Image (spheres, rainbow, N blue to C red):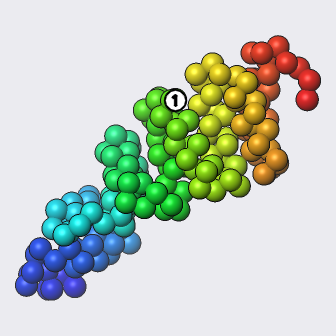
Amino acid sequence: MELALSYDSTNFKVLYDLARRKINQNKPDEALTYLNKAIYHSPNPMPGLHYARGNLFLAKEKHKEAYDDFVIVSQIEPNADRIWQILGDIALLHLKDYDKANEYFSKGIATDPNSYECYLGKGVAAYNSGNYEVGIESFNQASNISMNHPEIYYFRAHCKAETKDTEG
């Protein structure tokens, strides 16, 4: 495979294959180098390239860079698997942008109404921004979908305590 690169170092498909090989070999820095080149030489924005690079950036705790790549994926493929949850998680946990997190989790719910993860994230974003009623509603929806996650009940209890609502 690397021999093919010596013939055409601008072939984004070869570069992407090399990046995947480096990912499998647990060599993230080399994989990033190949992904950067593949993205540069790609004739059109390729969501798979940005998704892979976004995941590598997340692993390296480069959250803003990961966020930028996942935004590109969401623009190209708004129904990509878990894209809204990933963007919501980054906005919520790393960028502390609760309004943006709420927007992304809401898009995730519109794409997959059975995503307890998006309801949970939306609830946490609401809790962190002091919107406890929305938080309670979101945690109720999350628990209706999946009851086996104690964090749902933990955050819902905190929202209820903030609103002095102790029923249910």
Q: Is residue 51 above or below residue 88?
A: below
Q: Quadrant of residue 123?
A: top right
Residue 137 visible in image:
yes
- In the picture, measured across the screen, residue 20 lies left or right of residue 96, that is left
Q: Nearer the viewer, residue 108 or 148?
A: 108
Residue shown at the point (75%, 33%) measured from the top left: 137
Label 1, residues with CA under 10 Å away: few <14, some 14-19, many ≥20: many
Disc 1: which residue: 98
> Horizontal and vertical percent for residue 107?
55, 47
- In the picture, measured across the screen, residue 168 lies left or right of residue 2, that is right
Q: Nearer the viewer, residue 87 or 33?
A: 87
The quarter in which the N terminus is drawn is bottom left
Residue shown at the point (42%, 61%) measured from the top left: 77
The quarter in which the C terminus is drawn is top right
> Horizontal and vertical percent for residue 166?
88, 20
Residue shown at the point (51%, 60%) measured from the top left: 79
Query: Secondary structure under badge 1?
Result: helix
> Horizontal and vertical percent for residue 146?
78, 51
Q: Nearer the viewer, residue 77 or 50?
A: 77
Q: Is residue 44 above or below residue 55?
A: below
Q: Is residue 30 above or below residue 162?
A: below
Residue shown at the point (16%, 77%) measured from the top left: 11
Residue 89 visible in image:
no
> Horizontal and vertical percent for residue 139?
74, 37
| Dot 1 amino acid type | Tyr
What residue occupies the far left of the structure in this picture? 7
Q: Quadrant of residue 9?
A: bottom left
